[in-house]
Image: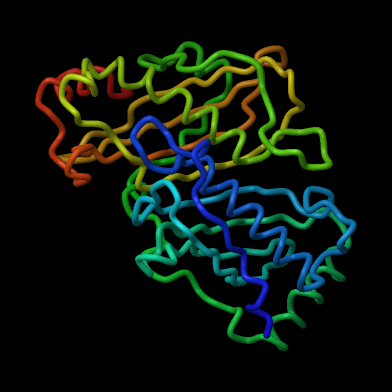
């Protein structure tokens, strides 16, 4: 059976963030690994090929449905959602094997770099042989909180002069994965956004240690333009887009400092969360007032 090689793993200690659940970047890291595994074991690409040589990851959307805690065993189900002219759309679902709940859903847009006709034929034949591997994104995998967020088409120069844009990370690009290509991947980029979160919280006049109220991502949307080599000087610029009863939304721009170039853009919906009860709560008034003052104009 084809599913005998389904991707399986468990949540490791180094993957846990300061809120006690698996950090967002590792959800994506496992998602990428699962995609590579399925491409290779199903002969969609050669065992000796790097996925980055044949495809460019253009976009990924993630919905976080149930948190993954330390030690949780999980699997990732792989599906083809759509085959376009020069793109493959992949749907993946991470399932907690203890609770039997879907922890997160991923929609991945991969642009075919070369051998377009050959690769498309491979995927089409794959679906003919395994029709149950075709699945349209179910409602729980579709973006909801980001539907009313327009994609801001900012140039680097406009970002620098736009009101209420903040520098939330500045450092050196580092790889966490030992892939064969000497470039960062999508999970590395998400890790940079994750590292910026404490700096975002500082702007909200809010203390997790004093209130025991933090935030957890419920949706992410990434647009990728270029993946850089380790050692590249990078920074992250961020701006608050909106505030609702329990959630607030940030936009981020990852910048190559030396080239003054936007490498990726991301939008994220954050839900306020009682860290003891592990339940969503209303945004504290003090925090809400502070956030309202920095919403992008």
Q: How many marks?
A: 0
Q: Quadrant of residue 21?
A: top left
Q: Residue visible at 42% across and 15% down?
A: 166
Q: Which of the two residues, 81 or 170, is positioned nearer the viewer here?
A: 170
**Location of the C terminus (image quadrant):** top left
Q: Quadrant of residue 295?
A: top left
- Residue 55 higher or lower than 261, as above or below: below
- Residue 81 higher or lower than 178, as above or below: below
Q: Residue visible at 74% across and 79% down?
A: 124
Give percent across and percent down for residue 85.
72, 66
Q: Residue visible at 53% across and 59% down?
A: 107
Q: Which of the two residues, 297 or 290, is positioned nearer the viewer here?
A: 290
Give percent across and percent down for residue 127.
68, 82
Colour scheme of this structure image?
A: rainbow
In-image side of 13 versus 231 (left or right): left
Q: Residue visible at 73% across and 29% down?
A: 228
């Amino acid at each position: 059976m084809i599913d005998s090689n389904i991707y399986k793993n468990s949540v490791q200690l180094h993957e846990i963030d300061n809120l006690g659940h698996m950090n967002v970047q590792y959800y994506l890291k496992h998602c990428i690994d699962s995609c590579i595994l399925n491409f290779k074991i199903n002969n969609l690409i050669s065992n000796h090929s790097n996925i980055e040589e044949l495809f460019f990851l253009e976009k990924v959307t993630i919905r976080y449905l149930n948190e993954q805690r330390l030690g949780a065993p999980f699997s990732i189900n792989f599906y083809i959602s759509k085959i376009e002219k020069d793109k493959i759309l992949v749907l993946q679902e991470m399932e907690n094997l203890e609770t039997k709940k879907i922890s997160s859903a991923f929609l991945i847009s991969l642009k075919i770099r070369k051998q377009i006709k050959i690769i498309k034929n491979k995927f089409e034949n794959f679906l003919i042989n395994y029709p149950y591997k075709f699945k349209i994104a179910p409602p729980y995998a579709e973006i909801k909180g980001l539907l009313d967020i327009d994609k801001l088409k900012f140039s680097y120069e406009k970002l620098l002069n736009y009101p209420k844009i903040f520098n939330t990370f500045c450092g050196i690009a580092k790889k966490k994965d030992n892939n064969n290509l000497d470039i960062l991947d999508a999970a590395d980029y998400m890790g940079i956004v994750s590292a910026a979160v404490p700096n975002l919280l500082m702007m909200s006049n809010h203390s997790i240690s004093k209130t025991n109220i933090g935030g957890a991502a419920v949706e992410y949307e990434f647009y990728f333009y270029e993946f850089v080599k380790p050692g590249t000087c990078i920074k992250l610029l961020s701006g608050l887009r909106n505030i609702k009863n329990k959630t607030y939304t940030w936009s981020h721009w990852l910048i190559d400092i030396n080239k003054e170039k936007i490498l990726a853009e991301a939008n994220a919906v954050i839900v306020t969360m009682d860290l003891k009860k592990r339940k969503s709560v209303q945004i504290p008034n003090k925090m809400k007032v502070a956030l309202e003052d920095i919403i992008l104009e």
